[in-house]
Image (cartoon, grey):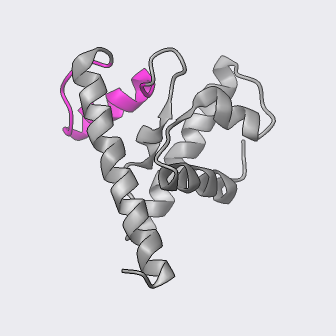
Amino acid sequence: MVDIEQLEKVLLRRALERRSVTYGELLAFFERRVTRITVMAICRDIGEVCRRIEAGGGGPEDIACLVVRKSDGLPGEGYFRSLREEGSYDGPSSGPQAEAEIARRQEDVFRHVAALAARSDGTA
């Protein structure tokens, strides 16, 4: 649906800024409206970005955790379902436990991307 390289750059830039991005903001960046179909398509594309980063090695493993719903600041149900399937989280998809898990995962991504940026700048 969108240019995967551009999507990866947007997500990495948000990580450097230590900010999440809503599905709506991400879709608007690519001049798309929020519909059930476009959200499903952008989720598929986010998955592709994650696979590219994993295959390349050295990147943040869970950059998808930065993409959240405007309503509660959490990723969608599909994100939590994938965590449960891989065995890395067994809690609910909303509420304090989910919020704490996402905050921890986002902090890991922020740290990882900042470290990569520092190394590429030669400052670390």
Q: Determine whether, in the image, residue 56 is placed left or right of residue 99.
A: right
Q: Determine whether, in the image, residue 29 is placed left or right of residue 15.
A: right
Chain part drawn in magenta = 74-93
Q: Judge whether residue 88 can be spotted in this image.
A: yes
In the rendered image, the quadrant that contains the C terminus is bottom left
Percent x, y for residue 70? 55, 20
Residue 51, magenta (yes or no): no
Tell which of 85 and 72 is nearer to you.
Answer: 72
Quadrant of res 38: top right
In the rendered image, the quadrant that contains the N terminus is top right
When the figure is inspected, residue 119 is found, relative to residue 7, above or below; the finding is: below
Residue at image location 18% in from the left, 27% down from the top: 90
Residue at image location 21% in from the left, 22% down from the top: 97
Tell which of 33 and 16 is nearer to you.
Answer: 16
Q: Judge whether residue 59 can be spotted in this image.
A: no
Residue 77, magenta (yes or no): yes
Residue at image location 67% in from the left, 23% down from the top: 37
Percent x, y for residue 108? 30, 51
Given the current orientation, which residue lies at the most extreme bottom position? 122
Percent x, y for residue 65? 41, 39
Percent x, y for residue 82? 34, 34
Q: Determine whether, in the image, residue 70 is placed left or right of residue 119.
A: right
Quadrant of res 72: top left
